[in-house]
Amino acid sequence: MISGLPGYTKAKHLLSERLLFGHKLSPELAAILLVYFVQGILGLARLAVSFFLKDELGLSPAQVSAFMGIAALPWMIKPLFGFISDGLPILGYRRRPYLILSGLLGTLAWVMLATVVHTAWAATIAIALGSLSVAFSDVIVDSLVVERARQESVQEAGSLQSICWGATALGGLMTAYFSGFLLEHFSNRTVFGITATFPLIISVVAWWISESRVEASSEWSVTDVVP
């Protein structure tokens, strides 16, 4: 057993006390941190998207700016995603299914960019779907952090938020180096294909989320709020 190896207990204690500020690395916490990490590392394709729109699709800087603005719309309606998650459980669950679907949607978007996208509007739709995936998963994982914070002290809640930001920053730091490195050695579409693998991590780790099934009586529908 790994737990019986020399130094395992010491390494586990170091991870918990030094890197996680006393938080125990449970499967759920690992899932939350991995979702934040993926949000940071998805910038891996940011440079590739810019070169793809400018060089392969021949868009002007003004057109690129306009299309990217359209693609950013999901981030402007983030509160709506929270209402959807809370009010419309899938199979009785409010968090896990939406994380799974978000990951699959993100993978689909990047696969589309890597394979079938050949026009500006198709690229905009694919990028917008990828943006929707990240925005929705961000709302879900933020709600998970809030739920955990309610059960902890103010100090522990603050340290949890710091860990989450750190996970995103780690993904961003890796992006800062590898985005240029990958683009130097591979084509834009290959970079999109590589990026498509990361949203799948969200779909996989969503199963680690501890969530109780919502009772049917606590679910609401449109008829509950519309006379």
Image (cartoon, rainbow, N blue to C red):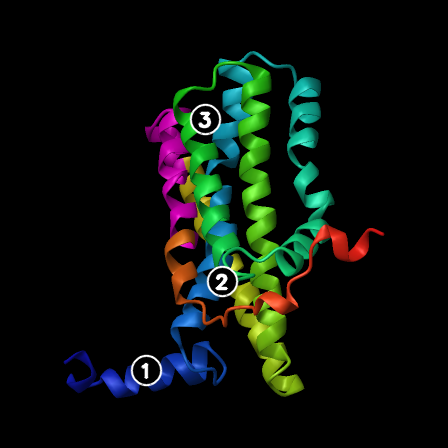
Q: How far, Cα to Cα, is label 3 from label 2?
A: 26 Å
Residue wearing tag 2: 167
Question: Which amino acid does the dot numbered 3 rest on?
Answer: Leu
Q: Dot 2 lies on which element?
A: helix
Mark 3 vs 1, N-terminal side = 1
Magenta span contains residue 79: no
Query: Which kind of residue does numbered mark 1 sit on?
Result: Lys
Q: Give whichever of 176, 92 is nearer the camera.
A: 92
In percent of width and height, residue 137 lies at: 55, 53
Identity of the amino acid at label 2?
Answer: Ala
In the picture, measured across the screen, residue 208 lies left or right of residue 57, that is: left
Residue 18 percent location from the top left of the image: 44, 81
**Rendered image: mark on residue 113:** 3
The residue sitting at the right extreme is 227
Is 45 placed above or below 3 here?
A: above
What segment carries the magenta color? 181-202
Q: Residue at x 48, y 33 (%)?
A: 109
Nearer the observer, disc 3 or disc 1? 3
Which badge, 1 or 2, is on the more N-terminal residue? 1
Q: Is residue 82 above or below residue 62?
A: below
Q: Residue at x 64, y 80 (%)?
A: 150
Which residue is tagged 1? 12
- Classify 10 Å Cα crowding around label 2: few (below 14), some (14-19), many (20 and above): many
